[in-house]
Image (cartoon, rainbow, N blue to C red):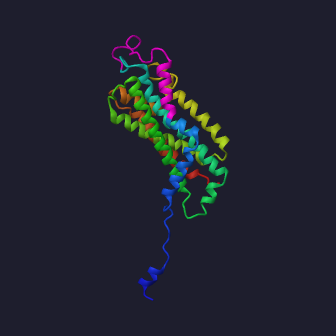
Amino acid sequence: MTATTATALRPRRRSPWAGFGLLLRTETAVWLRDASSVFFGVLFPTVLLVGVGFGIPGMREPMTTDVPPGSAWYGVTPIATYLPTVLAMSIGTLAVLSLPVTFATFRDKGVLRRLSTTPMRPQALIVAHLTINVVTTLVGAGLALVVAQLAFGLVRPEQLGVVLGAFVLGILSMFSLGMLLAAVVSKPSTANAVGSLVYFPLLFLAGLWTPGPIMPEVVRQIGQFTPMGAAAQAMDAGWFGDGFPMLQYVVMAAWTVVLLPLAARLFRWS
């Protein structure tokens, strides 16, 4: 038997990623059955914007009296200044609340351990759910932008590239934080509690209750060193200002560079 014949008869090793497409479709179908994840990932940013815009008096009136004429926010409606914070929130909701609970559930039920005995790499499940959550984040943010434009009319971003860069870095930094939580939490209830303890302070520091021009300076100074606060401030600067938010960009990059390798190092399959 020649070497060529022996090579032809030798069974081919199946790629460990060969079934990833099927896995992704299956996990997406399962994820879509969770009404709460779909609501908070896709609809909640839009519901919040519409509720605040129509529910709070004055949110649709241009700011001309309480804002100095030279300010970046002069003549802008308060609901428009709320948008960067809502976009940052849309990233953090899935990254910090949903993703850790998903993987804690898999770990608690032994899904990750069982998957490690199959030809499919366990890492494929991580990639699949990161893909699902990031795509959902993009859909939710896009829907919020479209509805906000139709309902309130948006100010065109002064620096669209800065806004997009901040949004991408926000995804990287906040999902790195979410993956760190997902790496170590073993129970869904614990993941939900820990995620909430992290999520709500991040919301406060990102300006959910005090957006744009009404944010206290101390909150702004602290918030710029958090991933959600840095994302909101960088998008705010790109939307209404003319400077480059270098500090906020560096902060988000630093969170990503530190937390993502740490999450990979600490990740437990069981």
Where, quadrant-wise, is the C terminus in this rendering? bottom right
Spot occupied by residue 58 in the image (x, y as percentages of width and height) = 45, 14
Residue 107 appears left or right of 228? right
Vertical placement of residue 170 versus 216, above or below: below
Residue 33, visible in the rendered structure:
yes
The magenta segment is 43-71
Residue 125 vs residue 254, the one in the foreground = 125
Vertical placement of residue 143 versus 220, above or below: below
Vertical placement of residue 203 versus 169, above or below: above
Spot occupied by residue 107 in the image (x, y as percentages of width and height) = 64, 51
Residue 234, visible in the rendered structure:
no
Q: Is residue 259 magenta?
A: no
Spot occupied by residue 134 in the image (x, y as percentages of width and height) = 47, 43
Where, quadrant-wise, is the N terminus in this rendering? bottom left
Q: Residue at x 63, y 59 (%)?
A: 114
Q: Is residue 52 magenta?
A: yes
Residue 112 vs residue 176, the one in the foreground = 112
Q: Residue at x 54, y 27 (%)?
A: 204
Residue furthest to the bottom: 1
Residue 28 vs residue 259, the one in the foreground = 28
Residue 166 appears left or right of 264? left
